């Protein structure tokens, strides 16, 4: 996995780790985009969103504005319920072979796109081949990396993946480069959605008004750029996510404050991100019409292999001391006003298999006396000199927590600790990816799909694309391989738990907290639930 999911900002993380696109103009609660007045009639849900960055092609969308639309208009082989459990949608069955290196996928009968054309094996094979081909430069091409024949070579033209084979119109096989026990779990991500044959006639034009295979389809008004996208129920959808309302209007706001003001006035039905300015008031202002719950977002800071912090005895003692000097509960309560949850592991509480009692996790407990003892042991090996710094991007809203954490480290360990601000996220990431960073630095990750491996392998595996500290552990790698090779998720998660215990010993990053989804809804709607990935389950919402 590459760095697509690395989080740029604290506020952005509350909505999603997908890259946030620009919004339309509008500055206050009375400036909802033109054309939305009166849309509250007819059971249509009014929700906030952002202008999609690109045409609505599944493999070309990696930001939240387009992602919301794709999740509503597309069906995939599986979908994720409110708790992140995998449920068959278009798939009748998804079966691995003995070592999970080859998967046989059978599609349910009589599944169609919104133009009446049948969803077949070719609908998936053609879409995945298009998405994986380097010549098409699709943003989510790396999701097809496990499939035989995949190439990431820039400019290469790989029109077909050798690992995709059609058996018949409703059955195809996927041969992977090695055992991958959670491959079936990944297939609910939007990049794996099918495409009709007509899409390839003019893919850019198709992306402006795509056909639907999911619970909703574009209304006649469709995509009004920089204003809204209107969706109506798809009468041909046969899956479980059947709309309980008359449609969804995704309205593009310039600011979350403007959207929040509309919510308070009941001119907006659902808001998936409370603005920072309302953290202290939204629960009382919305009464029982708000949510503050963990989402699949993990935040930390990494300590690269710099002086005093190599992966040796001294470095291990210092990493443990730093971790135990941090009062996570205090920071999440005071700085984030309980919109974060202190970390207990390296994944997320909303992921199936989450375990808050892993061996070694006590290193995340605030224990100032133990922290001082460990730091003194490290000093006995090699005395400390200098300043402990945490790099962060100033454009992401991180200054307050970095100052709080470094103050705790200073006060507990008796050393100088402070933040090192970068003007922009790109500047920080350039130093990280080039290997030029010489301090600790903030990191964040949101899962591509609700599986433990996605929080582990891409970030800490030897040579993995998002392994910012160049951490390498044969023990960790072996446990991850055993987890991947397991034929069921429960067994795999057992190996992933053991792999996390290795991480607790080495601490290539210091876990901090899970970002919560903070959202609210108007007096006009009922049955509002926010899913594992912080997104409302729009299809379940009913309008008064």
Image: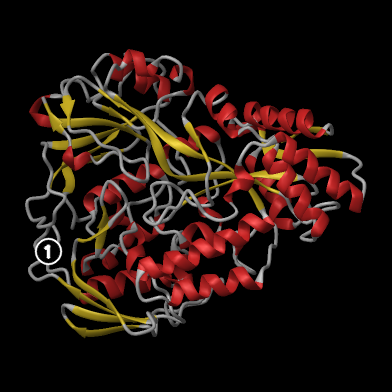
Q: In this view, does 50 lie to the left or right of 248?
A: right
Residue pictured at 79% horizontal, 42% vertical: 373
Q: Read off the residue under disc 1.
A: 112
Q: How many labels does the image show?
A: 1
Q: Nearer the viewer, residue 296 or 164?
A: 296
Q: Name above or below for residue 26 compared with residue 393.
A: above
Q: Name above or below for residue 480 compared with residue 69.
A: below
Residue 382 in sight here: yes
Q: Name above or below for residue 281 compared with residue 542.
A: above
- The location of residue 85, given as percent across then percent down, is 29, 55
Q: In this view, does 153 lie to the left or right of 121?
A: right
Q: In this view, does 282 lie to the left or right of 511?
A: left
Task: Name the image quarter holding residue 153.
Answer: bottom right
- The location of residue 512, given as percent across then percent down, is 59, 41
Q: In this view, does 427 lie to the left or right of 227?
A: right
Q: Nearer the viewer, residue 184 or 348?
A: 348
**The C terminus appears in which quarter of the rendering?**
top left
Instruction: Classify mark 1: helix, strand or loop.
Output: loop
Residue 390 in sight here: no
Task: Name the image quarter holding residue 98.
Answer: bottom left
Q: Name above or below for residue 317 compared with residue 146.
A: above
- The location of residue 456, given as percent across then percent down, is 53, 60
Residue pictured at 24% horizontal, 50% vertical: 209
- The location of residue 335, given as percent across then percent down, is 57, 24
Residue pictured at 45% horizontal, 79% vertical: 158
Colouring style = secondary structure
How would you rate the neighbour count of disc 1 (Cα within 10 Å): few for under 14, some for 14-19, many for 20 or more? Answer: some
């Amino acid at each position: 996995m590459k760095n697509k999911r690395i989080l740029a900002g604290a506020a952005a993380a509350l909505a999603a780790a997908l890259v946030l696109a620009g919004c339309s103009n509008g500055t206050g609660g009375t400036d909802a985009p033109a054309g939305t007045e009166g849309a509250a009639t007819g059971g249509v849900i009014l929700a906030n969103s952002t202008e999609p960055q690109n045409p609505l092609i599944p493999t070309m969308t990696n930001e939240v504005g387009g992602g919301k639309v794709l999740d509503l208009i597309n069906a995939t082989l599986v979908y994720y319920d409110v708790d992140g459990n995998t449920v068959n949608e278009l798939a009748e069955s998804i079966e691995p072979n003995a070592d999970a290196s080859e998967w046989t996928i059978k599609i349910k009968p009589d599944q169609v796109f919104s133009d009446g054309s049948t969803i077949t094996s070719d609908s998936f094979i053609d879409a995945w081949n298009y998405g994986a081909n380097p010549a098409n430069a699709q943003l989510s091409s790396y999701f097809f990396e496990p499939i035989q024949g995949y190439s990431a070579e820039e400019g290469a033209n790989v029109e077909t993946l050798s690992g995709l084979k059609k058996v018949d119109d409703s059955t195809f096989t996927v041969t992977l480069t090695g055992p991958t026990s959670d491959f079936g779990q990944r297939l609910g991500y939007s990049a794996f959605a099918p495409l009709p044959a007509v899409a390839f006639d003019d893919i850019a034009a198709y992306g402006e008004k795509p056909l639907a295979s999911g619970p909703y389809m574009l209304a006649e008004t469709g995509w009004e750029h920089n204003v809204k996208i209107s969706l109506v129920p798809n009468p041909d959808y046969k899956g479980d996510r059947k709309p309980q309302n008359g449609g969804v209007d995704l309205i593009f706001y310039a600011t979350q404050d403007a959207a929040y003001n509309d919510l308070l006035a009941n001119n907006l039905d659902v808001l998936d991100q409370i603005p920072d300015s309302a953290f202290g008031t939204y629960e009382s202002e919305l009464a029982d019409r708000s949510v503050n719950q963990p989402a699949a977002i993990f935040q930390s800071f990494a300590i690269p292999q710099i002086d005093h912090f190599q992966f040796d005895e001294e470095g291990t003692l210092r990493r443990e001391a730093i971790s135990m000097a941090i009062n996570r509960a205090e920071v999440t309560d005071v700085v984030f006003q309980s919109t974060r949850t202190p970390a207990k592991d390296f994944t997320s509480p909303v992921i199936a298999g989450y375990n808050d009692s892993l061996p070694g996790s006590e290193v995340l407990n605030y224990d100032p006396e133990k922290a001082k003892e460990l730091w003194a042991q490290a000093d006995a090996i090699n005395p400390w000199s200098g300043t402990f710094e945490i790099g962060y991007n100033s454009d992401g809203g991180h200054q307050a927590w970095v100052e709080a954490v470094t103050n705790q480290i200073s006060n507990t360990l008796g050393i100088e600790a402070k933040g090192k601000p970068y003007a922009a996220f790109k500047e920080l990431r350039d130093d990280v990816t080039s290997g030029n960073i010489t301090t600790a630095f903030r990191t964040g990750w949101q899962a591509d799909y609700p599986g433990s491996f996605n929080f582990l392998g891409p970030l800490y595996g030897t040579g993995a694309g998002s392994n910012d500290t160049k951490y390498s552990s044969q023990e960790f790698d072996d446990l991850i391989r055993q987890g991947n090779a397991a034929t069921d998720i429960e067994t795999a998660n057992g190996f992933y738990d053991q792999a996390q215990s290795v991480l607790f010993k080495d601490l290539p990053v210091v876990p901090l907290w899970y970002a919560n989804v903070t959202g609210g809804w108007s007096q006009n709607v009922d049955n509002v639930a926010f899913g594992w990935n912080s997104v409302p389950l729009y299809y379940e919402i009913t309008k008064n």
